[in-house]
Image: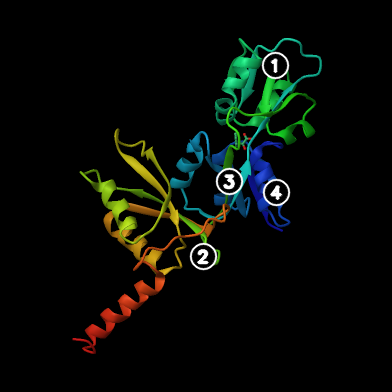
Amino acid sequence: MSRIAYFGPQGTFTEQAARRLASGEELIPAETIPAALAAVRSGAAGAACVPIENSVEGAVTATLDSLSEAEPLVAVAEVLLPVHFSVLTRPGTTEIRTVASHPHALAQVRHWVEANLPGAHPVATSSTAAAAVAVAEGEFDAAVTAPVAVEHYPLEVRATEVADVRDAKTRFLLVRAPGELPEPTGADRTSIVAAATNRTGALAELLTELAVRGINLTKLDARPTRNNFGEYRFFIDFEGHVAEPRIGDALAALRRRCRNVRFLGSHPRADNGTTEIEPGAANEDFTDAIDWVQSVRKGAQA
Ligand SMILES: O=C(O)C(=O)Cc1ccccc1
């Protein structure tokens, strides 16, 4: 049986996501997002589960950076989880001077902390569950965690359902080494990372290649290449599956236009969104057009 590495330790939101995405595989915690992805690259795990995007805080940059570096990996599935937090302390804690958690969690409970734990200092930890470990060990006073974390660590619940923004969600990916792709479903998402050439209009040209084919973007992030100041990679998610002629045509255009394009996967969307197709931009329109050009070349149509 294969193994799924997840951004741990036990009790993270990512572990909950990995449980939803697993089908009998053993789950193994990794301390960081790059470590979870490295486990797949080394063959220690068959897949990894990592957070990619939060409805309040935006992109999980550690995931973007790790996916664009080293050996290519592709996302084969995703899950969307509602995110609200519990606040945990050691039993008997009376004074809370430090509140620890993952930066994305701290950013989502800032107002609650100000109102309910005035004067408490936020402290960033590698994950929400790492904060629970640190609180259990006496390093900090309170941890902002996933509700399930209390089942793993000797802490008590101070507050539940904590969130400054109602209905916050995080999207998680299941990532594998390149291989067989999931079948298209009609409601899919494709992800790429592209290094556009550094000249006027380069990003606009990339986006235009998608727009003129009626392809709807679902996410756009820029990350520095880290090599030259001012040089960026663009992470672009859009509706559709690489197996579709219209998406294949767009990817081929991006490949022509960019210094570098890396395919990061095509898989079913977790939000069950429908894909709107503009007139003239359906898959049959693309195949009919290619067939017509072929017939022109053969002299069948003048
Ligand atoms: O630290 C965790 O539990 C994670 O899985 C990352 C995270 C942090 C905050 C919100 C959603 C996911």
Q: Earlier in the sequence, mark 2 or mark 4?
A: 4
Determine whether the residue tagged by mark 4 lies in a helix, strand or loop: helix
Quadrant of residue 167 within the rendered picture: top right
Q: Which mark is residue 19?
A: 4
Report the Cα–Cα distance between label 2 and label 1: 48 Å
Crowd around label 4: few <14 · some 14–19 · many ≥20 (10 Å): some
Determine whether the residue tagged by mark 1 lies in a helix, strand or loop: loop
Type of amino acid under label 1:
Asp
Tell me if label 3 and label 1 are in contact, CB under 8 Å.
Answer: no
Question: In the image, what residue occupies the spot 36% across and 39% down?
Answer: 225
Type of amino acid under label 2:
Gly
Residue 259 in view: no
Report the Cα–Cα distance between label 2 and label 3: 20 Å
Residue at the disc numbered 3: 172
Type of amino acid under label 4:
Arg
Determine whether the residue tagged by mark 3 lies in a helix, strand or loop: strand
Residue at the disc numbered 1: 141
Report the Cα–Cα distance between label 2 and label 4: 25 Å
Crowd around label 3: few <14 · some 14–19 · many ≥20 (10 Å): many
Question: In the image, what residue occupies the spot 67% across and 37% down?
Answer: 12
Question: In the image, what residue occupies the spot 32% across and 58% down?
Answer: 255
Type of amino acid under label 3:
Phe
In this picture, residue 273 sits left or right of residue 131: left
Tell me if label 4 and label 3 are in contact, CB under 8 Å.
Answer: no
Residue at the disc numbered 2: 186
